[in-house]
Image (cartoon, rainbow, N blue to C red):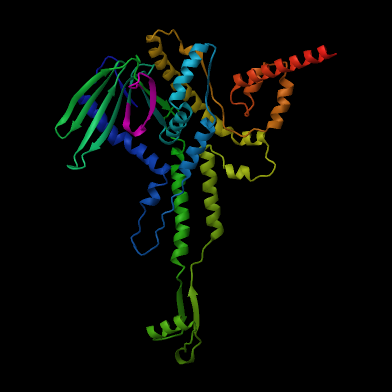
């Protein structure tokens, strides 16, 4: 994390230095995380042997993507619910979020958090004067925070390269986002020059950072050494099988066996040799003695440790157990929930900041909204037994409101719409009752 005194402005020299330091000290870690997510695991993919003739299988197990994808699915696989008592604000905000594909956008951001330790988005005004937001590559941004206790986002640098296909010259374009403007620079062999400065209406830096946790680390980052060990163990097993597939034939008590004789025996699949001075001939295959059980136990222990240390349970193992209740599944996700609770705290903080930026623009246009009027609800993507929920609902009837009860049901996606349907059915039933009275 880069920090800067709040009263200090960024010169071109500072911007260049921040980019150079970032590329040398921060970017390599992010690119490594990305490689492991894409199953390009460094240790096994870069492994070499002095003897080039030995088998060198590259088995890169995609455990990183397994962990990141399952954390993301559990965290935001079910859409985040936005609500407000201020119906005007709710309608306006819902329209903005819908136009920006809020649900799928959140999944993309959460996935970046799981891989890189952070996600990022840019808020901007499009050509149609609409409020938009878009995901940014975490490898292309440099957030700079204040040195005070609030750690306010003072600036954010975004950079990207463009290569001229004819000259093969690379130009780096730099965007500096501050609380009131976006300044664009061009960096090439001649140096860094200013292109333009454009003001924006968001009143704060319009780039929003989503931290995965306090240490800004990815979900699988701590278990990379375990993944490497498993890759090597799997590859060594495969290499051993390949190496001894073509076994050596051992002749004992035979002298001066000609190559033509050996070839003839291979083709005819018949072994016919005579021993030296009447000695007994011993023909056998030379094979490697291996302890498969020990190796399999070692690999199983690695798998168990990967799940344990990443806090992501082995879902297949849970699913293959017979008669597993929904409560048992929840218990198996207890450690996962502790990790996701931290994710939720950071994600909610970032969402509140985003809504504040959006409301800043809406209020400039004449509205009088407050971010405190918006409630954010996260919904875990976990299996639930409808029959057990039904028992709980019956017991809760008359104790809590219908709206609260309906919020607990996974089959109800829109609580307000469901309440309207219930009211409509109640009205129809009451009319039918009156018709029966009139008929009597």
Q: Is residue 58 visible?
A: yes
At a point 53% along the width and 61% down the height, the residue shown is 291
The magenta segment is 124-142
Circle count: 0
At a point 73% along the width and 27% down the height, the residue shown is 391
Q: In the rendering, at what x and y percent does residue 143 appear?
A: 33, 25
Q: Is residue 258 visible?
A: no
Position of residue 255 relative to residue 115, above or below, is below
Position of residue 295 relative to residue 137, above or below, is below
Foreground pick, 409 / 261? 409
Instruction: Give the image quarter of residue 183.
Output: top left
Q: Is residue 132 magenta?
A: yes
Q: Quadrant of the N terminus?
A: top left
Position of residue 26 relative to residue 305, above or below, is above
Foreground pick, 407 / 329? 407
- Taking the image as shown, residue 197 lies to the left or right of residue 278, namely left
């Amino acid at each position: 994390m880069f920090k800067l005194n709040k009263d200090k402005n960024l010169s071109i020299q500072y911007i260049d230095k921040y980019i150079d330091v970032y590329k040398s000290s921060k970017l390599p870690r992010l690119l490594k995380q990305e490689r492991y997510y894409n199953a390009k695991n460094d240790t096994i993919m870069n492994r070499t042997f002095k003897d080039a003739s030995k088998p060198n299988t590259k088995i890169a197990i995609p455990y990183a993507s397994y962990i990141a994808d399952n954390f993301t699915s559990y965290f935001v696989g079910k859409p985040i619910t936005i609500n407000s008592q201020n119906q005007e604000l709710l309608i306006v905000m819902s329209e903005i979020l819908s136009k920006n594909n809020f649900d799928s956008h959140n999944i993309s951001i959460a996935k970046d958090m799981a891989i890189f330790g952070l996600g990022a988005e840019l808020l901007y005004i499009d050509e149609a004067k609409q409020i938009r937001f878009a995901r940014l590559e975490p490898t292309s941004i440099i957030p700079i925070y204040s040195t005070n206790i609030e750690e306010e986002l003072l600036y954010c640098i975004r950079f990207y390269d463009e290569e001229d296909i004819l000259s093969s010259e690379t130009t780096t374009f730099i965007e500096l986002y501050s609380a009131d403007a976006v300044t664009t620079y061009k960096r090439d062999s001649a140096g860094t020059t200013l292109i333009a400065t454009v003001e924006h209406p968001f009143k704060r830096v319009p780039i929003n950072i989503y931290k995965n946790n306090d240490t800004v680390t990815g979900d699988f980052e701590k278990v990379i050494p375990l993944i490497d060990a498993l890759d090597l163990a799997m590859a060594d097993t495969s290499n051993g099988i390949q190496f001894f597939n073509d076994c050596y034939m051992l002749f004992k008590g035979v002298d001066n066996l000609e190559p033509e004789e050996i070839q003839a025996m291979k083709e005819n699949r018949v072994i016919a040799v005579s021993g030296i001075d009447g000695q007994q001939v011993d023909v056998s295959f030379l094979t490697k003695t291996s302890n498969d059980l020990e190796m399999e136990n070692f690999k199983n222990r690695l798998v168990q440790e990967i799940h344990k240390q990443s806090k992501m349970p082995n879902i297949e193992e849970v699913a293959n157990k017979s008669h597993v209740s929904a409560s048992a599944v929840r218990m198996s996700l207890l450690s996962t929930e502790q990790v996701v609770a931290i994710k939720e705290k950071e994600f909610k903080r970032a969402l509140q900041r985003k809504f504040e930026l959006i409301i800043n623009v809406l209020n400039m246009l004449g509205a009088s909204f407050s971010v405190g009027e918006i409630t954010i609800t996260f919904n875990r993507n976990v299996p639930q037994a409808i029959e057990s929920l039904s028992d709980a609902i019956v017991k809760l009837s008359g104790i809590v409101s219908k709206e609260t009860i309906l919020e607990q049901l996974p089959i109800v996606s829109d609580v307000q719409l469901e309440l309207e349907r219930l009211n409509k059915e109640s009205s129809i039933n009451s009319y039918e009752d009156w018709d029966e009275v009139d008929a009597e």
